[in-house]
Image (tube, rainbow, N blue to C red):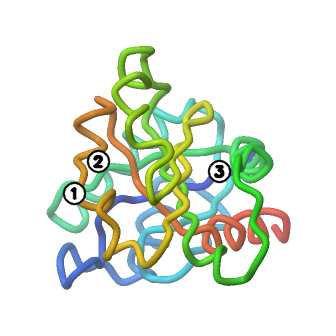
Amino acid sequence: MEKFIALIRGINVGGNKIVKMQDLRTMLQSLGFQNVKTYIQSGNVVFDGRDGGGETLGGAIEQGISETFGFDASVIIRTAKELEAAIANNPFELTGAEEFKRLYVSFLAGELTDEALERLRPYEDGEDKLRVVGKEMYILYKTKVSDSPLFKVPLEKIMGVSATSRNWNTVNKLAAMVREQ
């Protein structure tokens, strides 16, 4: 068995697509996953499973969500090794606790094309800082995310791939959960 992290997009946000974490764990166990643990209410799951590839596992979980809860939600999968690499590849030097709250990692469904990377260049060094490393996009916001001009930019449309974002503290908590298992 290998350790995986499922990052489910858009559940329990703004009162929409409500899923109780116990129900989500039960659904994942019914799919054959073991040692299923969730973190907070926003679709973060650590589990053991057989390696079928991220797309295969994500597709199975997406289908399970649709059948069990009656709505669609995209799922991005990372292995424990990929999550550790995402942490190690953080391009920003964080010097204070406040910066940890303003760093977000967007987990991308795939690597970006050269054209997509070129379209992101104007957003790299504004008030907010943006970097893409492999299948992750890191954004260090100058202030609160919701106050940022970058927050209103349709980054997914620019990139051409779906993504789901987590703050730096959540990313590190998920890594700690994987190490504990």
Residue 73 lies in quadrant? bottom left
Rendering coords of residue 66 (x, y %): 22, 56
Label 3 sits on residue: 4
Q: Residue at x 61, y 72 (%)?
A: 170
Label 2, secondary structure: give it. helix
Rendering coords of residue 98 (x, y %): 64, 83
- CB atoms of marks 1 and 2 within 8 Å: yes
The crowding category of the residue bearing disc 2, from other C-alpha atoms within 10 Å (few below 14, some 14 to 19, many at least 20), is some
Label 2 sits on residue: 63
Q: Nearer the viewer, residue 60 or 44?
A: 44
Q: Nearer the viewer, residue 106 or 145?
A: 145
152 relative position to 23: left or right: left
Which amino acid type is shown beneath numbered disc 2?
Answer: Gln
**In this figure, what is the number of numbered marks?**
3
Seen as rendered, the residue at the extreme top is 114
Q: Residue at x 30, y 78 (%)?
A: 12
- CB atoms of marks 2 and 3 within 8 Å: no
Q: Residue at x 46, y 33 (%)?
A: 56
Q: CA distance from mark 3 to mark 1?
A: 22 Å
Label 1, secondary structure: give it. helix
Label 1 sits on residue: 67
Seen as rendered, the residue at the extreme right is 180
